[in-house]
Image: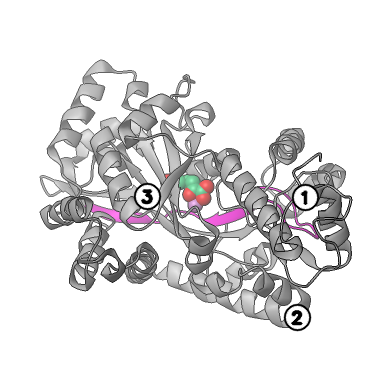
């Protein structure tokens, strides 16, 4: 079969994201409520702010909004993560970033599988925050060995899925029937099981070490634990939640509300306590699944991120239990962070994608370097700069989301050195540096826009 007849990665990813969303809506009705709330808020925002609508449309960022979600799962072994990486690769999703959660008392490290190219992101930016349990952080030797042997006995993938992935990797793609089968089989890995693989006593022992360990080890698969639609106004969505019968967590994580949204703001509702049938037919409870919403803003450069991290750290002393007070404090602290697109761009605090939209009188013979030419062309409106959406996650926010879903009793893990290399060995490849991706999109778009307008680009500094 010619490769042009293979079903595209983007099509498989879109179908999978839609199937996962439908499954989770059926499993957790509050998630369906949340998607309705977010759609209503987004409609209102777009109706009230035509300039924002135009900006999103011009940047190819409007179409994807209604399908945009991220999900999260947690796996137990290197082999499980390795197979997931192969599965996500088929959907055009690569591991981006390394997130060390142990530093925040959560015994996992993680990466985010997501599309990496502008065109793919515009079609469907589906992301899955994927954590690998750090069994090395279980302090009790006996318990660690027991967790390892329980995990060694399960297979979180169907045998048909394994066959399909092997076939894909041999021939390089899927025909229509294979693509459909793949989506159906892949979904099985993420399904909820209300029966545990262990007895209640084992569950309790693992949960006493850390509830996340019990969540990963005691079930047949890594149930999807939340799906997160993207809202254009998280403050409105947060305050509307009670009207929809949803109780949000106390505060919105991430940066404060701004004219120009940066990075990522998130809030969630608490995980549900669900009935579980344990081996030996005991009925008990487990809390794992929750709902979350997010608002995405422009991606920051390393300088912008350093400023963000410094300001967020300064906000740490403020109480994290009343959203209005916390947001007011945060807004005060973040006053130092420039809040208009032009300053963010000129000071290289954020990433932009350049696009030629007109014709220029400047040509390659004009005595100017490409940076001066770019500024002149931006000023005359021949080239426009679109803020690049932040497609990744934030470790401090992620840790707070994890913690808010573990119940009230404090869980703790001894601090341990981050271990990116261990995660990469499990993945079978290095994780991609998110900054490098944004920088490349920016640099490539700048070059292409200048070439389009001037025919050729004067080398920088010429
Ligand atoms: C993942 C929590 C992190 C986010 O949006 O930061 C996350 C989990 O609870 O498994 O999804
Ligand atoms: Ni999340």
In this figure, which residue is indicated by the disc labeled 2? 48
In this figure, which residue is indicated by the disc labeled 3? 287
The magenta stretch is: 254-276
The quarter in which the C terminus is drawn is: top right
Mark 3 vs mark 2, CA separation in Å = 39 Å
x and y percent of residue 375 in the render?
Answer: 85, 55
Q: Residue 344 colored magenta?
A: no
- Name the quadrant containing residue 175: bottom left
Question: Can residue 188 be seen by looking at this rendering?
Answer: yes
Residue at 12%, 57% in the rendered image:
160
Residue at 21%, 55% in the rendered image:
168
Q: Residues within 10 Å of mark 1 (few under 14, many from 20)?
A: some
Quick one: label 3 or label 1, which is nearer the N terminus?
3
x and y percent of residue 152 in the render?
Answer: 16, 34
In this figure, which residue is indicated by the disc labeled 1? 325
Nearest to the observer: residue 345 or residue 205: 345
């Amino acid at each position: 079969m010619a490769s042009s007849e293979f079903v595209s990665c983007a099509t498989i990813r879109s179908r999978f994201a839609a199937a996962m969303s439908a499954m989770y809506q059926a499993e957790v009705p509050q998630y369906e409520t949340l998607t309705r709330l977010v759609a209503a808020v987004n409609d209102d925002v777009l109706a009230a702010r035509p300039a924002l609508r135009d900006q999103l449309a011009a940047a190819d960022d409007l179409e994807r909004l209604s399908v945009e979600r991220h999900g999260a799962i947690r796996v137990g072994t290197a082999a499980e993560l390795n197979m997931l990486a192969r599965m996500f690769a088929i959907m055009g999703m690569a591991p981006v970033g390394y997130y060390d959660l142990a530093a925040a008392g959560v015994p996992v490290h993680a990466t985010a599988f997501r599309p990496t190219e502008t065109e793919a992101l515009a079609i469907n930016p589906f992301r899955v925050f994927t954590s690998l349990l750090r069994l090395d952080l279980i302090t009790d030797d006996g318990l660690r060995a027991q967790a390892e042997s329980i995990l060694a006995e399960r297979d979180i993938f169907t045998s048909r899925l394994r066959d399909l992935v092997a076939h894909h990797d041999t021939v390089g793609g899927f025909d229509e029937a294979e693509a459909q089968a793949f989506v159906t089989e892949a979904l099985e890995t993420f399904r909820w099981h209300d029966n545990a693989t262990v007895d209640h006593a084992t569950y309790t022992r693992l949960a006493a070490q850390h509830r996340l360990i019990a969540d990963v080890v005691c079930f047949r698969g890594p149930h999807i634990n939340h799906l997160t639609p993207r809202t254009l106004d998280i403050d409105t969505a947060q305050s509307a939640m009670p009207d929809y019968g949803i109780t949000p967590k106390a505060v919105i994580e991430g940066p404060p509300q701004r004219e120009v949204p940066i990075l990522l703001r998130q809030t969630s509702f608490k995980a549900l306590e669900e009935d579980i049938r344990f081996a030996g037919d005991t009925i008990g409870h487990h809390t794992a699944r929750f709902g979350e919403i997010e608002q995405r803003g422009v991606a920051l450069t390393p300088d912008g991120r350093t400023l963000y991290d410094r300001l967020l750290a300064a906000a740490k002393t403020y109480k994290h239990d009343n959203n209005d007070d916390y947001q007011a404090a945060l807004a005060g602290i973040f006053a130092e962070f420039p809040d208009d697109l032009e300053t963010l761009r000129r000071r290289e605090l954020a990433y932009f994608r350049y696009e030629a939209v007109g014709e220029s009188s400047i040509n390659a013979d004009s005595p100017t370097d490409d940076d001066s030419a770019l500024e002149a062309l931006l000023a005359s409106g021949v080239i426009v700069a679109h803020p690049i959406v932040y497609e990744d996650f934030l470790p401090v926010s992620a840790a707070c989301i994890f913690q808010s879903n573990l119940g009230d009793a404090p869980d703790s893990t001894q601090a341990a050195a981050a271990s990116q290399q261990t995660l990469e060995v499990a993945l079978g490849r290095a994780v991609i540096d998110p900054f490098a991706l944004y920088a490349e999109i920016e640099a490539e778009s700048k070059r292409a826009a200048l070439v389009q307008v001037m025919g050729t680009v004067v080398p920088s500094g010429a």
